[in-house]
Structures are given as structure tokens and as C-alpha cells.
Image (tube, helix red, strand yellow):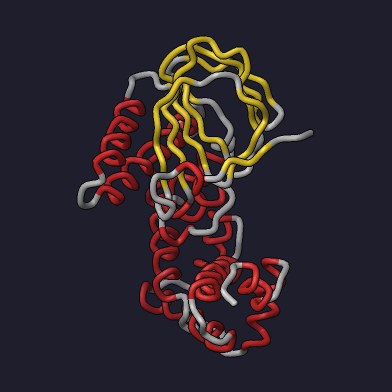
Amino acid sequence: MKFYTMKLQELSEESTDPVYIMPFQQSDVELHDHNFFELAYITGGSAWQNLAGKKERVKTGDYFIIDYGAVHSYQECNNFTLINCLFLPEAIDDVLEGGRSLDEMLRICMIRYYRKAFAQEKTANRIFHDEDGRVLKLLRVLQMEYSKKEFGWKEIFRSRLKEILILMMRSTILQHSDFDSDKIANEDEMISDLVRYLHKNGKERAVLTNYCQTHHYSLSYISRRFRQETGMTVLQYLQKIRIDQSCALLAGSKLPIAEVAQAVGYEDAKYFSEIFKRMLGMTPGAYRRMSGNH
């Protein structure tokens, strides 16, 4: 199967912007994928969409997020108009730069909402319907902020985009009668606080021990709760944070690899290289060369 890849850098007015939003009339388009996430809102007409191998009719008021790299097409477009909001993961949160899965990003930055919503279904490539027009109003704000680009526009854009994501998760959650919002919020606040702490203090040698001592939790309890909520151990999550940070340093600085390792919390450069290769399938040096930072 042949298809082409659309790149955000080729569409955005400024190649450094992690977002691009545009209203337009869509004609039939062949199978293609993207190197970005696409939030599409149908403002008029209808079409058949083939998304991730599933063919569905989309119509006015429907909206959905097409995942990074998902193959899709539109056929039999009938007066079909959309607002398309294209974004990279860092448009949601800077710590997500380099992310390649919407659900992975939501797991990281919206843990308190994510677990209950997507134990049931994933968000990406799923069609929602804007019953009360709230999502369309938020998209209009995104359009205005993007076109004017006044002081603070990126922060407003980020907050409204997050609001849309939360509304999508709410829609999923409310379909299940066993959901207890107060219970989930109370349970997950602790995990959300730990995630913020790990991102801020991830370079510390005994970061989890320090957190537990400061907040008066037992190490075994917090470790067990974290795995229950996120599906990974604290160490796995901490390694992901450190490796993500090291990727930014490898691509954007001339620091020797040993200093990159120390900067993200690894005293042993050899151990850092082993973890890096295990997670990304290449050495830090190979990653630096691939990024063009020779």
C-alpha cells in the first residue's frame, strides 16, 4: 500500500511553531500519514473516512484526533468543511517533546484523567460528537489566538487544547456508569504530584526516597500505587524522563556524552549508554549524528 507523509514544517507559517490551525474545504484525499497529531472538527457536510483500517462516515459536529503516523484518507466528500488543528506533543507540554503516541502523552501529562478513561477505550482515531458546541467554541479561540499571535498566545492555545482533550476523556468516561469522579480525583492527585516531582527533580540519586520522606509515604506503597495508575514502575518512568532530556541535550548541545549522562542523573556514562540503547535502539552517539548535531 502506497501513501505519502505530510510534515508540519511544510505547512506551518513558522517552522518553529509546534501548532498550525486552518479552516478549509476538503476534497477527496488519498491515503497519507503525518509527522504530527491532527485534531479535526467537521464544520459542514460529510465524508467517508478510512482511518487506521476502519471506514466510518463523519458529519457536521464530529471531531477526532488522528494519531501521529496513523494512515487515513477521505472519500466521497460532500460539501465537506473542517477546522484542522495540527500539533506536535510539545504544544501540550514541553516535557512531551519527541512523543509519538497520543495515549502515551495523555498517560504522562493527565494521569488523573487518563487511567479511568482509557482503561475502556483509546482516544486517538476515535470519533466524538460535539453535542453542545463547546468544542467548536474552543477551536474558534484557538483560531483567533493563532492568527493574532499576541503576547501569551501559545499558553492560551495550550490551555484550550488541553481542555478539548479533557472533554474527550470526559465523553469516554461518562459512557461507563461505574465511574466515581471524586474517588478517582483523590486517588490520582498523589500520583500527579509525584509525576511533577519526578520531572522537576529527576536528576537526584534517591529521588523516590526523598519524595517519600518529604511526603510521609512508604516506599512500597507509593511504588505499588504508581504502577497501578500508570502501568509502569517509577524507575521505568524516571528512565524515560532522563532519556528524553538526554535526547534534547544530544541534539542541541556540544556536551560530551559523559557530561550529558551526568546532567540527566547518570553518574556512570557506560550505564547511561546501555539504558539509552535499550530504550531507543541506538547509542547516544548515533542519536546525536542522526539529529544532525555532529
Camera-side residue of 268 and 48: 48
Going 67% across and 21% down the picture, which residue do you hit?
55
Image spot of residue 169 (x, y percent): 46, 36
The percent coordinates of residue 250 (x first, y second) are 55, 75
Q: Nearer the viewer, residue 151 or 281?
A: 151
Quadrant into which the C terminus falls: bottom right
Residue 84 sits in which quadrant? top left
Q: How many numbered marks, from 0 up?
A: 0
Residue 268: image x %, image y %?
61, 89
Task: Using the image, determine if residue 109 lies above or below residue 119.
Answer: below
The reply, left or right, for residue 273 in relation to residue 142 is: right
Please name whichever residue, 1 or 242, is drawn nearer the observer in this view of the structure: 1
Instruction: Please identify the quarter of the rendering in which residue 32 is found.
Output: top right
Residue 188 visible in image: no
What residue sits 39% from the left and 50% below the top?
14
| Residue 19 appears in view | yes
Residue 64 versus residue 242 in the image, above or below: above
Give the quarter of the figure containing the N terminus.
top right
Q: Residue at x 46, y 40 (%)?
A: 86
Picture layout, residue 134 above or below residue 200 = above
Left or right relative to 168: residue 141 = left
Q: Residue furthest right?
A: 1
Left or right: 218, with 162 as reference point: right
User: At 49% from the left edge and 55% from the top edge, which residue is drawn?
Assistant: 108
Q: Position of residue 111 (x, y in %)?
A: 46, 52
Depicted 46 relative to depicted 278: above or below:
above
Q: Quadrant of residue 20?
A: top left
Name the side, left or right, on which 40 lies relative to 150: right
